[in-house]
Image (tube, helix red, strand yellow):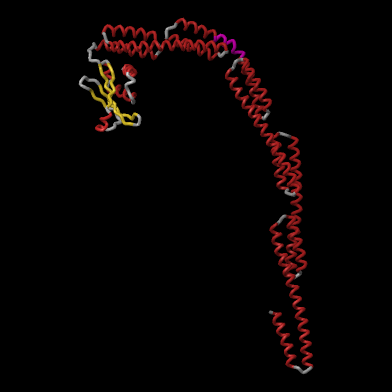
Amino acid sequence: MVHQINRVFIKFKDVFQGRQDEIRNFIVNHFEKDFKERIVEKIERIDATEKIGITGFRDNLSSWRDSDRNIIISTCLIVGGKQKRYDYKIVFLKEKFHSNDIERIKKALNEVDNLRDKLKLKIAVVKLDSATKLAKEMNIPIYMEELEEVKEEITTLEKDFNKKLDDLVENLRIHRENNNINEALQDCDDIVEISKSINRIDLMDKYNEITNRIMTEMIADKEKRELSFEKILDLKTQMNKNRERKNLTEAIVICKEIIQIAKSNEMIDEIEKYTQILDQLENEKLILEDKKKTLINELKELDEEIEFTLANDKLEEALNYSEKCVQISMTLENNDLIKKYQFISERIQKRIADVKEQNKKLLTELEELEQKITIERGNNNLELAMDLCEKIIQLSRALNRIDLMDKYSDILTQIKNDIENQKATKQNFEDLKIAIERLNKEGLDELYRNKLIESLGKYKEIKELLIRYIE
C-alpha cells in the first residue's frame, strides 16, 4: 500500500509547498486503510494562513475529516521568511466499486512496482495490460489514467536501458581495442544483466559468448603479464635502493624502463602509478640539486669564516665552522671535501690544545705573580710591586682574562698612588727637617745674644711645625 501512496504523492507533487515527506509518513501511519479501500480523485491546497492568529504557528501536523470522509491535513511552515499555514484536502471518489475488483487492481499495481524495482520490465508490462483491461471493464477512469502513466514510466525506463546498452556496447568496443580486459568483462556482465531484465535473450547469448572469448584471451595473456610483473618488481627494488641512496638519476632511468614495460603490456594502473613516481623522482632530483647548490654556497661562506677566525686567533669559532663543513661535505657525499675539512679540524684542535697548555703555564705564572705582589706590598716594596702588577696585566691580556686585567689595573693605580704619597711624605719630612734646623740655629743665635724671648719664639715655631706634621 505504501507504493500506492507514493504514486499519489508523485502525481500531485506540485500541490505541496513543503514538508512533503512528513505528510506522506503521516498518511502512512494514520490513513493507510483509506488509501487501500478508496480511490484518490485529487488533492487540493487551501491557504489557511489567517488561522495562525487563532490556533497559533504549530510544528506538528494535524488532521480531520469532512462530511464526505475526505481527509484534511494541516501544516505550518516558513515560506519566503513568512509564517504560512496550508490545509491539504485529499478528495476520494464517491463512486462505489466492488472492493474485490479494486483490490485486484491495487495488487496488480503493487506487483508492477516490485517488478519495476527488480528491472523485470517485460513482465511488468504484461501485468499492466491485465490491470488496464480490468479497469476498463469496471469503467474506473482514475485507475485507467494511473495505469497508463505507470506504463509510460516503464516504457521510458526501457528506453533508458536500451540507451545504457548502446553505451555499454560502445564502452566494450573501446576497452577491447585498448586491451582493458577487466573493464571489458565488466561491460559484458552489465550488458547481460540489463538484457536479462528486458528479456533480450539474443543479447544475453551473444555477450555470454564474448565473455568466454575474453576469458580465453586473458588466459593466453596471463603468462606474459606475470613475467612482466616479475620484471617490474625486480626493477622496482633496484629503483627504491637508488632512491634511498639519492642516486636519483639512476632511479629515474629504471622508472622509465618500468613505464615502458607497463605500456607494452597495457598495464594502465602500473603506467599511472609509475608515471606519478617518475614525477616525484624528477621533483626530488630538482630539490636535491637546489639543495646541493645551497650547500656548496654555504660551504664557501664557512670556508671564508674559517680563514677570518684563524687570522684573529678565534680558534673555537674556527673549529665550529670547520666541523660544519665536514657535515656539509658528508651530505654532499664528497670524499675529497670530507678529508680536507677533517684535516683542517684536526689542525685547529691541535692549536687549541697547544694554546690551552700555554695558557696553563701562564696561569701558573700568574698565580705566582699574584702571591709576590701581596708580599712586596706588605714589605712596602712598591716599585717592585708595580712592575709585577704590570706584568700580570700583560699576562691577563694574553689569556683574555678581562676580570684580572680590570682587577690589577685598579691595584696598579693604588700602588702608583701609594708611591706618590710615599714620595710626598718623604719630601714633607725633608722640608720639616730643614725648617727645624734653621729655626734651631736661629734660636741658639738669639740665646747667645741673650734674647731669651726671641729664642723661645723660635722653639715655639719648631713645636708648632712638629704638631702639624704629626697631625
| Residue located 76% across and 82% down the image | 435
In the image, residue 237 lies in the stretch drawn in magenta: no
Q: Is residue 428 above or below residue 138?
A: below
Question: Residue extending furthest left?
Answer: 67
The x, y position of residue 187, in whole percent, is 50, 12
In front here: 143 or 56?
Answer: 56
Left or right of 190? Residue 357 is right
Bounds of the magenta span? 214-224
Which part of the image, by quadrant, shows the C terminus?
Answer: bottom right
Which of the 4 image quadrants contains residue 61?
top left
In the image, residue 215 lies in the stretch drawn in magenta: yes
Q: Is residue 450 above or below residue 14?
A: below
Which part of the image, by quadrant, shows the N terminus?
Answer: top left
Question: Residue extending furthest top?
Answer: 202
Which of the 4 image quadrants contains residue 457?
bottom right
The x, y position of residue 13, in whole percent, is 34, 20
| Residue located 35% across and 31% down the image | 81
Left or right of 37? Residue 378 is right
